[in-house]
Image (cartoon, rainbow, N blue to C red):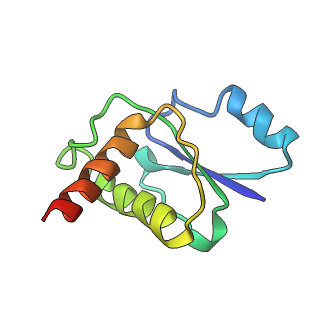
């Protein structure tokens, strides 16, 4: 099983989630978005953990990687159809849900 986490700032790491993932047998990989690291292929993610940060999901101009990250989250949810836990990032999930509602209503 492969867990991947998205890290927005250096001081928001997995913390105690890491111990649980290791005990549960997950191979752990990460993308440090603040270092402009690339995102993995969707097929290499069994479980996605999204860490928090001081930025808003609407701060695309200040953090251009947010656009790609939100699209990645959408693909993980829609394409893989795998339930995904979100850690400390209800903002990212809320943005996704808001976009989906707008699509349905239009």
Residue 30, given in percent of the width and then of the height, sits at 60, 51
Q: Quadrant of residue 23?
A: top right
**34 and 13: which is toward the camera:** 13
Q: Residue at x 40, y 31 (%)?
A: 53
The answer to whether 82 appears left or right of 22 in the picture is left
Residue 67, given in percent of the width and then of the height, sits at 29, 57
Q: Classify the position of the C terminus by image quarter.
A: bottom left
Q: Residue at x 25, y 49 (%)?
A: 98
Q: Is residue 41 visible?
A: no
Vertical side of 56 occupied by 76: above or below? below
Vertical side of 103 occupied by 87: above or below? above
Q: How many marks?
A: 0
The extreme left residue here reads: 106
**101 and 22: which is toward the camera:** 101
**93 and 14: which is toward the camera:** 93
Residue 81, given in percent of the width and then of the height, sits at 55, 66
Vertical side of 17 occupied by 68: above or below? below
Q: Classify the position of the N terminus by image quarter.
A: bottom right
Residue 25, given in percent of the width and then of the height, sits at 86, 49
Q: Is residue 106 visible?
A: yes
Q: Quadrant of residue 41?
A: bottom right
The answer to whether 82 appears left or right of 104 in the picture is right
Q: Residue at x 37, y 44 (%)?
A: 92
**3 and 86: which is toward the camera:** 86
Vertical side of 106 occupied by 12: above or below? above
The answer to whether 97 appears left or right of 89 in the picture is left
């Amino acid at each position: 099983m492969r867990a991947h986490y998205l890290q927005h700032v250096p001081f928001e790491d997995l913390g105690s989630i890491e111990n649980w993932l290791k005990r549960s047998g997950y191979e752990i990989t990460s993308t440090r978005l603040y270092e402009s690291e690339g995102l993995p292929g969707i097929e290499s993610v069994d479980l996605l953990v999204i860490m928090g940060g001081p930025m808003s999901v609407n701060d695309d101009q200040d953090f251009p990687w947010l656009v790609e990250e939100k699209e990645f989250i959408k693909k993980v949810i829609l394409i893989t159809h795998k339930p995904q836990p979100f850690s400390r990032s209800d903002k990212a999930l809320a943005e996704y849900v808001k976009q989906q509602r707008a699509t349905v209503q239009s």
